Amino acid sequence: RKEVEQDPGPFNVPEGATVAFNCTYSNSASQSFFWYRQDCRKEPKLLMSVYSSGNEDGRFTAQLNRASQYISLLIRDSKLSDSATYLCVVNGPNTDKLIFGTGTRLQVFP
Amino acid sequence: EPEVTQTPSHQVTQMGQEVILRCVPISNHLYFYWYRQILGQKVEFLVSFYNNEISEKSEIFDDQFSVERPDGSNFTLKIRSTKLEDSAMYFCASSEDRTGSGELFFGEGSRLTVL
């Protein structure tokens, strides 16, 4: 089983749509969870951290289910500028290493 | 806004040659990292560096790789004898806190092409 698994997409959605991405991780001892965004041929940038209670940042909502080892990202009212690859990222206990998923590509069209 | 800077942006080299990739982390950060991304694949951890020594390294980071902080600002990755499979984008990153508690700031990357 991959350490962090994501549906690669692409997800093609119209502007204004709501889109959800899912991610599963294999190490039940993982402690920190993040969504990063990566534009084509650019560096990853932190979108948001993911907390057990769930958290929201504007149009973005992240959820964590530790029992199922499942993380989600919901984007409401999609904008053209949301087009990017969304990386699910996990950090285990007592390690500096961030483990990245392969990413889910989102394309928002007019 | 402070940022991580990397040079060169692109380097082409012959197999077997030595390559040094340079990074200037954000000035008040204490933790430094190198990651790489082979084209079309996921971002992979190479090494972390704290308090002037390697704190963790991956199985990718073999004897051909080394890191150094030669002065107060630069953080370098050296590949001693490049192989074709070293072709990738190499990202330097820095953070104020250890990875799990803080945001990692990535540089724009150095694309290495080994011929």
Image: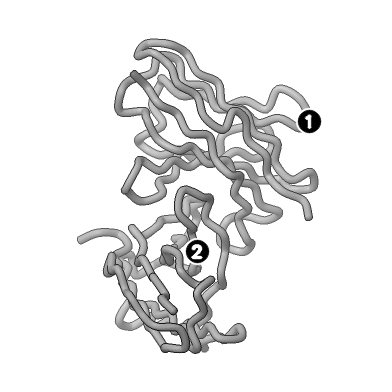
Identity, as a three-letter code, of the amino acid under mark 1: Gly
Vertical comparison of A90 with B6: above or below: below
Residue in front for this viewpoint, B14 or B90: B14
Mark 1 residue element:
loop
Q: Residue at x 28, y 65 (%)?
A: A8
* Number of other residues with Cα within 10 Å of mark 2, as a class: few under 14, some 14 to 19, many 20 or more: many
Q: Quadrant of the C terminus of chain B?
A: top left
Vertical comparison of B58 with B96: above or below: above
Whether callout 1 and callout 2 share a subunit is answered: no
The residue to which callout 2 is attached is A37
Q: Nearer the viewer, mark 1 or mark 2?
A: 2
The residue to which callout 1 is attached is B72
Query: Alpha-carbon distance for marks 1 and 2?
Result: 30 Å
Mark 2 residue element:
strand
Vertical comparison of A46 with B106: above or below: below
Q: Are marks 1 and 2 in contact (CB under 8 Å)?
A: no
Q: Residue at x 41, y 49 (%)?
A: B43
